[in-house]
Image: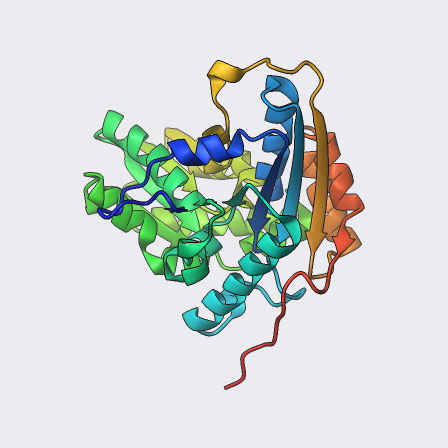
Amino acid sequence: MLISPCENASGSTSRVPLAERAARDPVTIVVTDSGLGGLSVCAELERRVREDGLYRKARILFANALPEAGQGYNRMRTSAEKVAVFEAALKGIVRWCAPDVILVACNTLSVLLPEIRFARESSVPILGIVETGVEALAERLRADPAAVGMIFGTETTIGSGMHKLLLVEQGIAPDRLITQQCPDLAGRIEATGKGASAVSAIEGFVAQALAQREVPPPTVYAGLCCTHYGYCAEVFEASLRSRGVSTPVIVNPNTRMVEILFDQRQKGRFDHPDIQVEVISRARISPEEQASIAGLVEPVSPPTAAALRSYSLKRDLFPYQPFRE
C-alpha cells in the first residue's frame, strides 16, 4: 500500500507527489525490511541510480526493521505487537535517517501499514510493496484469462488476505487465485542463499500450492510476495515446471518497486552520480547471513554487497521490548 500525505478521501493515492519528493537532489532514500530480503530492492535501486543518471547525489540506506536476531515479525504472537514494533522502527528511521522517501520492501510489514498511525500521518511518503505485487499480477491475469495466479508469502502476508482481496477488487475471480504460506523460507534463504535447505522447502511449498487443484493449471503466474523469494526465482520456476505446469511465469515485485522513483524524462542528467550506500541494523547480522545475501546481490550492485559486509550495528535505531503475556 502507498501511504503518504497525498492520499485523498476516496482512498486512492496519486504517485506524482511521491515521485516529485524522490526527485530531490541530493536525495536520501531508505529501504526497509523485516530481514535482508529487501536488500535486493536496495541493490536494484543503486544500479538504477548509477546507470540512469537521474540524481547528482543520492544516499541510499537499508534500515533493517528486525528488532533482534531470531525475533522476526512472523514469530510475534499478535498483530498488535507487530504493529507496535514496526511503528517504533519507522519512527526511528525517520529520526535517524531523515529520508525523503521510505520503501517498505517487505510484504510482511507492508500489510501492517494501514494500521500504523505514524505511517498515515508522517510527512515522509512511505511506499509498501503489496500494491506493487498486486498490480503486476493483475496486469498479467487480465491479459491471460485462462491462467491462474499463485501467491507465495510468509504467514503474516498470506494470513492477512490482502493480496487476494486487492486482486479480487481489480476484477480477478477468486477461483483463479491460489495462496500458499511458506513458513521460515525467508530465514532459510538468508542462511543458505540458494542452498539445499531453501530448495527443498520451495519444492515442498510449490507441491502444497498445486495440491489445491486436482489438475495442474497449464499457465501459472507465481507472485513471489516476499522480497527474499526473488533470490530463488529460478528455483520456483523449475519446481512448478517439474510438477506439470507447462508455462510457469515468475512475477517478482522487487524490481518494479523501484520504478516509482524514476522519471525517465530526466534520464541521463548526470554522467557520474555520487552514490552512498549504507546498511544499518538494530539486530546483529551474522557473518553467515552477510556472506549469503552479499553473494546474491553483488552481481547487481557491488556497493550494496560491500555495505552489507560492513554494516553498522545501531542498537538505538528504535526501542524494543518483547511483549509479555
Q: Residue furthest bottom?
A: 325
Residue 167 image position (x, y, % from top left)? 27, 43
- Residue 256 visible in this rendered orientation of the protein: no
Q: Could you tell me how many numbered marks the image carries?
A: 0
The relative height of residue 174 versus residue 140 in the rendered view (above or below) is below
Residue 306 image position (x, y, % from top left)? 78, 38
Residue 11 image position (x, y, % from top left)? 26, 47
Q: Is 258 displayed left or right of 130 in the figure?
A: right
Q: Residue at position x 50%, y 49% from top?
A: 106
- Residue 316 visible in this rendered orientation of the protein: yes
Colouring convention used in this rendered image of the protein: rainbow
Q: Residue at position x 31%, y 29% from top?
A: 140
Q: Residue at position x 53%, y 68% from top?
A: 75
The relative height of residue 314 versus residue 126 in the rendered view (above or below) is below
Choose top left, top right, bottom left or bottom right for residue 172.
Answer: top left
Choose top left, top right, bottom left or bottom right for residue 16.
Answer: top left
| Closer to the camera in the image, 295 or 274 | 274
Q: Is 298 displayed left or right of 165 in the figure?
A: right
Residue 298 image position (x, y, % from top left)? 71, 33
Q: Residue at position x 53%, y 29% from top?
A: 23
The relative height of residue 52 versus residue 221 in the rendered view (above or below) is above
Q: Is 59 displayed left or right of 184 in the figure?
A: right
Q: Is 10 displayed left or right of 307 in the figure?
A: left
